[in-house]
Amino acid sequence: MEHFIFDPIIAGIVCCIAMDVWQRILFLTFNIPPTNWSITGRWFMMLISKKIIFNQNLDHENPVRYELQIGWAFHYWVAIIYGFVYYFLLAVFDILDTSILSGLIFGLISVIVPWFFYLPVTGKGFMGNKTPNPTLTILLSTSSHVVVGVFLAIGFSFLGY
């Protein structure tokens, strides 16, 4: 039972750190800013307080107290959820393994979440079509989620799966 609880949490944190490092590398190499987790925190708090799911003007809403910290916490919480999903597909349903290929596939499938949920609810449109550079948005979300998937596979591999 403890593997069910702790292993997905550990793997989720590992993949989240890897994604954050990946975004820092992109920033240092190409001057592409990393995800602004303040917006995520603002969205989450407005969801809780005002029951607003889709917020087309989120960037222009007044900041929410502690939105950056809340955004970071939410970011890691979501990564842990990905850890549990990967765990179930790996250890319960035997659909995935800990290979880089399984991680790549999982990461490519998981990009559905930002493309069709996160970007639309934060006012960026489906697949980021309301951003200044939708192609770049698609590439960044895809590459970040590939990193998530690959590092989930690596994390579970190190945990003995």
Image (spheres, helix red, strand yellow):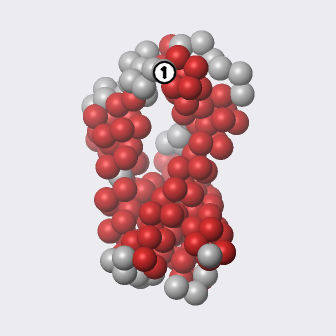
Secondary structure category for the residue under label 1: loop
Rendered image quadrant of residue 55: top left
Residue lying farthest bottom?
A: 160
> Residue 148: x and y, percent?
48, 61
Q: Position of residue 58 (x, y in %)?
A: 48, 19
Residue 137 visible, this angle: no
The answer to whether residue 79 is visible is: yes
Considering depth in this image, is 99 or 159 the residue closer to the camera? Answer: 159
What crowding class fits label 1: few (fewer than 14 Cα within 10 Å), some (14-19), or many (20 or more)?
Answer: few
Disc 1: which residue: 51
Left or right of 5, for residue 99? left
Position above or below: 113 against 71: below
Outermost residue, front side: 1
Residue 10 position by quadrant: bottom right
Q: Mark 1: which amino acid?
A: Lys
Left or right of 41, for residue 144 = left
At x 32%, y 68%, the residue is: 105
Classify 50 as above or below 36: above
In the image, what residue occupies the spot 51% across and 13% down? Answer: 60
Which residue sits at x=62%, y=76%? 1
Task: From the top left corner, tell me how far across and down residue 41 is, in percent.
Answer: 60, 31
| x 48%, y 21%: residue | 51
